[in-house]
Amino acid sequence: MDINLWNQLLGGFATAATPVNLLWALAGCMLGTAIGVLPGLGPAVTVAMLLPITGQVEATASMIFFAGIYYGAMYGGSTTSILLNTPGETGTMVTALEGFKMAKHGRAGAALATSAIGSFVAGSIATVLVTLFAPVLAEFAVKLGPPEYFCLMLLAFTTVSAVLGGSTLRGLTSLFVGLALGLVGMDQISAQVRWTGGVMEFMDGIEVVLVAVGLFAVSEALYNALYEGRSRAELNCMTSTHMTRPEWKRSWPAWLRGTALGFPFGCIPAGGSEIPTFLSYATEKKLAEPEHKKEFGTTGAIEGVAGPEAANNSAVTATLVPLLTLGIPTSVTAAILLSALQNYGIQAGPQLFTTSSDLVWALIASLYIGNVMLLVLNLPLVGLWVKLLKIPKAPLYAGILIFATVGVYGMRQSSFDLWLMLALGLVGVVMRRYDFPTAPVIVGLILGPLAEAQMRNALSIGEGSWTVFLNRPMSLALLIVIALVLITPRLLAWHRRS
């Protein structure tokens, strides 16, 4: 590490470790963890609500506080995803796929532990990378254009649809349902209203968290009431709150792979934590040992929790790279953090490391401190959280429905949203009954509008010609990878039959 960089980081620790700033970091971590548990609230809404404190609190302290809320929410969101199949944040939806199945089969403690430790490992490594390579990575990210972004999203579509569920056709069907839902509302480019059916509530589109809560939490409660009401309560048993040696052995490579996938996506303006978490899940399922692969979608595979959770936290930490070095926010929360900086008259960008060096390095140092705080806060609570599973099924699922209702209604105070959530819950029951994976619906909904905008921008660059995707080396390489993802499994299957 460069000696100047080392001195600046030590200066940042000296600022962040003052009693007042440590208290703000702790308050942010605790509040963020609580917010992550509640579906619909989220760090962006909370930071937006608390923006007025910028007029009362010193700049460094408030940015440390807001950053604590931001990454604390990622830790908290995994708790309800694993225990109740209710993702608090879009980034923790993939955690629910395997984490909830592990919880139902007595392994909630291991799922929560690998989630907390994976978040710590990924957050710490990503913070080191932010410290060392922020300007370099941001400079590379700027060189990516609409064709590359569109191909990245196309890769996410094909990978997720091919890997989730037992059938690629069913996966693609679910994906197109999500893409259709993503088209509802006002077109981002032309401002034309589409697919609203004259319903005013659809003008702003369909909230991702609403769809996630409907398809995951509400459908889980309804499915259990309809089809598993008489099943034995032993599904809610609990064996241990610690990870075994084999689980440690299976988790650490997944943590490292998830971190490596998440960080680049956090750096690019069309990134976010959704793409790397789904890609991480697909990667872990592909690389799993044959005896472990059968746990995916059945009893729950620990790699399917460890990898996506690491990818999520790595991507969240990496959003600071373009925010601080270029002034480009890559998430809603990052955009609000940018407005908080502007409230202090601080302009994010290449000059920030010179003009507000003390604030930047204190903020980076607070990430190291916050990660340790969150690990200390979350690991001892694993045993407490797991006790939720001892609640009998009927009140537990009634509580989930109340929890989901409060969270969704709190987003826009709209009764229409509640009816839509219930309808999506019923759709989720049908999909589960006929083995259609629900995760591709969420992928299509989140990335569909973004992919459409990037595709139209790319075609504008190419003056209407589709060859623009073949003329650029990065987008061409991504298209080749997409073709391999779709063709290779079929060639291998044909080879085995012959």
Image (cartoon, helix red, strand yellow):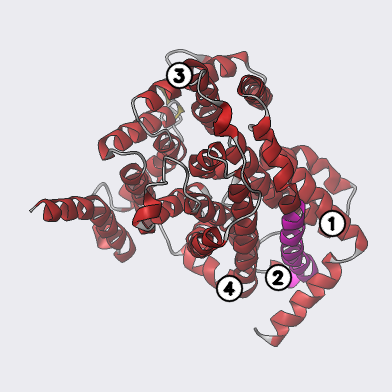
For residue 317, the mark is none
Residue drawn at the location 63% of the way across and 25% of the way down: 400
Residue 6 vertical placement versus 331 (above, below): below
Which residue is tagged 1? 61
Distance (Cα) linking label 1 and label 3: 52 Å
First of labels 4, 2 by sequence position: 4
Looking at marks 1 and 3 on the same chain, the residue that comes earlier in the sequence is marked by: 1
Asked whether the viewer can see residue 456, the reply is yes
Mark identifier at residue 227: 3
**Mark 4 = which residue?**
133
Q: Earlier in the sequence, mark 2 or mark 1?
A: 1
Q: CA distance from mark 4 to mark 2?
A: 13 Å
Q: Are marks 1 and 3 in contact (CB under 8 Å)?
A: no
Return the residue at label 2: 353
Q: Earlier in the sequence, mark 2 or mark 3?
A: 3
Q: Which residues are magenta?
A: 353-377
x and y percent of residue 9 in the render? 75, 75
Q: Secondary structure at mark 4?
A: helix
Crowding near pointer 2: few (<14 within 10 Å), some, many (20+)? some
Name which residue lies at 52% across and 61% down: 246
Mark 4 residue type: Phe
In the rendering, at what x and y percent does residue 325 appear? Answer: 62, 65
Residue closest to the eye, 183 or 444: 444
Residue displayed at 62% across by 40% down: 238
Earlier-in-chain disc, 3 versus 4: 4
Residue 374 on the magenta span: yes
Q: What is the CA distance from the residue labelled 2 to the residue labelled 3?
A: 58 Å
Give percent across and percent down for residue 365: 75, 67
- Please tell me whether residue 448 is drawn above or below residue 430 in the rendered image: below
* Disc 3 element: helix
Prevailing secondary structure class for the magenta stretch in the rendered image: helix
